[in-house]
Image (tube, helix red, strand yellow):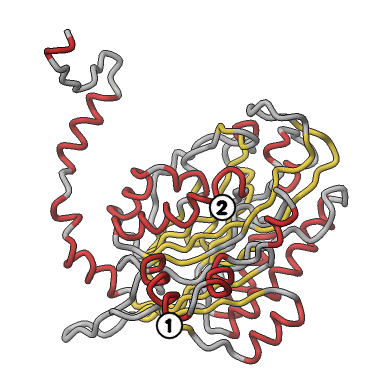
Amino acid sequence: MSAPQQKLEKMESVLEKYIPEDELKEVKRVLYGLNRGKPVAKLPITKEAQDLATKYNFEIVASKIEAEPEQLRPPRIVRMGIIQNSIAAPTTDPVLDQYLAIESKIEKMIDAAGAMGVNVLCLQETWHMPFAFCTRERYPWVEFAESASNGRSVQFIQRMARKYNMVIVSPILERDDVHGSTIHNTAVVVGNNGNIIGKSRKNHIPRTGDFNESTYYMESELGHPVFHTVFGKIGINICYGRHHNLNWLAYGLNGAEIVFNPSATVGELSEPMWGVEARNASMTNNYYVGSINRVGTEHFPNEFTSGNGKPAHKDFGHFYGSSYFSSPDNCRTESSSRVLDGLNIAEVDLNLCQQVKDKWNFQMTGRYSMYADFLTQYVKPDYKPQIVVDPAMK
């Protein structure tokens, strides 16, 4: 990505700079939607959290999404947080030094989340390491892999979860200590007491451009688990899974109220899609989505090539951050920066999930038996597409 593109910090700032104030309100209504007939409200940032952000050079964005008051159910208010971060040490440093540098950075950001009263937090895809998978080099990168039950980063997250009474979703590179030490792209769900509730794995492995990660891990066999926590029902749709509509659908049918999409994706490949896919999933499946993308450009010591015909290179391009939340009522929050580490927070009412279901009736009108019959036929070797040919073409 060119230097000018990397300097573009936020799309919102461009809109505010060039669009007159009286027109900007309507532009944002069309682009970002309304919550209960109003723009998404800002949530005050505490002094303690802002002091941490200023001292350690990260951004905090905070929003509030409301539901309609109900007569029989009290509001179910939850504060969600998502963290995007760059790596903190050169990829040529020892593996442990690289990890500890990132852990130190993340600890301060989780402290800020705690100061903001965040209940449920999700980190970015394999937050504890560089996104080295596209180099296709086994070492040293597989040394970042760890047990999902007692690995170094897992124990760190358990401590932070206990400290702040916070559910934390921690996406890591997992070495399965039960099944032959194989490697998986995994999200560990840590409960607010520091207990491990369970884990989810990446269902879809990209095979496009630099992103051919099957050198390291294959598709999950765990399905679409939804974790019932004290702060709501949570699913994790890891990275490339956001391009698959049925993946989003399955988390919704399993009862998710919040689905996190921890990702690592670069501007040239996917940025025009970023603001659309998760928001569409949130609207059509009637849950909240937290979309997280890492930030920065990561350089590696050895050149690597990819399937796109470009010359060998030492980086994937610019991870454009821009993490944000989508709401089931079709609105979305402000994005985090494209260039800075960031904590994005949304205070929401989970009652809105059911309210939107009752309004749009997507689940009631879904033709699931028809879809199931179609897919049953489609996976058969002798399947023939249901195409009706115009007789005049024969």
Most distant residue in the top direction: 394
Q: Residue 312 in the image: x percent, y percent?
A: 77, 31
Dividing the picture into quarters, in which one does residue 13 lie? bottom right
Q: Residue 51: x percent and y percent?
A: 70, 87
Circle count: 2
Q: Nearer the viewer, residue 115 or 195?
A: 115
337 with respect to 68 (left or right): right
User: Going by the image, does 134 lie left or right of 164?
Assistant: right
Q: Secondary structure at mark 2?
A: strand
Pointer 1 or 2: first along the chain: 1
**Residue 168 at least partly seen:** no
Residue positioned 19% across, 22% down in the render: 386
In front of the other: label 1 or label 2?
1
Q: Amino acid at mark 1?
A: Ala
10 Å crowding of disc 1: few (<14), some (14-19), many (20+)? some
Which residue is painted at 61% across and 60% down in the image? 321
User: In what element is the residue under mark 1?
Assistant: strand
How far from the left and from the top, in percent, is residue 110?
63, 74
The residue pinned by badge 2 equals: 263
Q: Is residue 367 above or below residue 390?
A: below
Residue 156 figure quarter: bottom right
In the rendered structure, the answer to whether residue 287 lies left or right of residue 137 reads left
The crowding category of the residue bearing disc 2, from other C-alpha atoms within 10 Å (few below 14, some 14 to 19, many at least 20), is: many
User: Which residue appears farthest toward the right when viewing the image?
Assistant: 93
Which residue was labeled with disc 1? Answer: 41
- Location of residue 150 with respect to 194 vertically, above or below: above
Work out whether residue 19 or residue 120 is closer to the camera in this orientation and state it.
Answer: 19
Distance of label 1 from label 2 (alpha carbons): 26 Å
Residue drawn 70% across and 72% down? 107
> In which quadrant is the C terminus drawn?
top left
The amino acid marked with disc number 2 is Ser
